[in-house]
Image: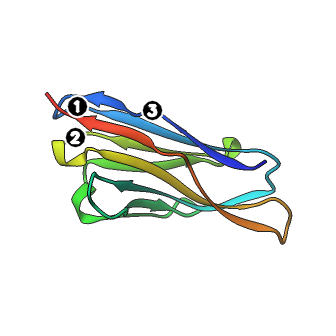
Amino acid sequence: QVQLVESGGGLVQPGGSLRLSCAASGNIFSVTAMAWYRQAPGKERELVARITNSGSTNYVDFVKGRFTISRDNAKNTVYLQMNSLKPEDTAVYYCNGGVYITAWKYFELWGQGTLVTVSS
């Protein structure tokens, strides 16, 4: 079974930092672009950052300069370093990625979500 498993959420004070991890596990042939989304209470899920398998990155405006997405292709893992956190960053963060289990069999996967709470 191929899946994305997230870790690293928790409670942090405003101005603090957290690092989220998302590992693709199972019988994997390759991983394509990966991304982090978030969903705050009562709001739609929204894209936070995206990284291609060659390392090109995109960020939404509200996290530029504060969050950094990176990946370790050898470990099939993507990270989200979050600095200068604000209360409005409070949300469940989801990992999303494309996984090939053979050269032609592709799945788009979502992680189970990890809660980030920014509060004093």
Q: Could you say whether the residue bearing mark 3 is in a helix, strand or loop?
A: loop
Q: Amino acid at mark 2?
A: Leu
Q: Amino acid at mark 3?
A: Gly
Q: Amino acid at mark 1?
A: Gly
Q: Name above or below for residue 30 compared with residue 111.
A: below
Q: What percent of the width, then of the height, locates residue 1?
A: 79, 48
* 83 or 5, nearer to the observer: 5
Q: Name above or below for residue 12 compared with residue 56.
A: above
Q: Could you say whether the residue bearing mark 1 is in a helix, strand or loop?
A: loop
Task: Tell me the number on the disc at residue 16.
Answer: 1
Q: What percent of the width, then of the height, locates residue 114?
A: 44, 40
Q: Residues within 10 Å of mark 3 (few under 14, many from 20)?
A: some
Q: Earlier in the sequence, mark 2 or mark 1?
A: 1
* 106 or 82, nearer to the observer: 106
User: Circle 3 is placed at which residue position?
Assistant: 8
Number of numbered discs present?
Answer: 3
Q: What percent of the width, then of the height, locates residue 18?
A: 35, 33
Q: Residue at x 31, y 47 (%)?
A: 91
Q: CA distance from mark 3 to mark 1?
A: 14 Å
User: Circle 2 is placed at which residue position?
Assistant: 85
Q: Assess whether mark 1 and mark 3 are in contact (beta carbons under 8 angstroms).
A: no
Q: Assess whether mark 1 and mark 2 are in contact (beta carbons under 8 angstroms).
A: yes
Q: Residues within 10 Å of mark 2 (few under 14, many from 20)?
A: many
Q: Classify residue 100 as left or right of residue 83.
A: right
Q: CA distance from mark 2 to mark 1?
A: 6 Å
Single out the residue that lies furthest toward the bottom.
104
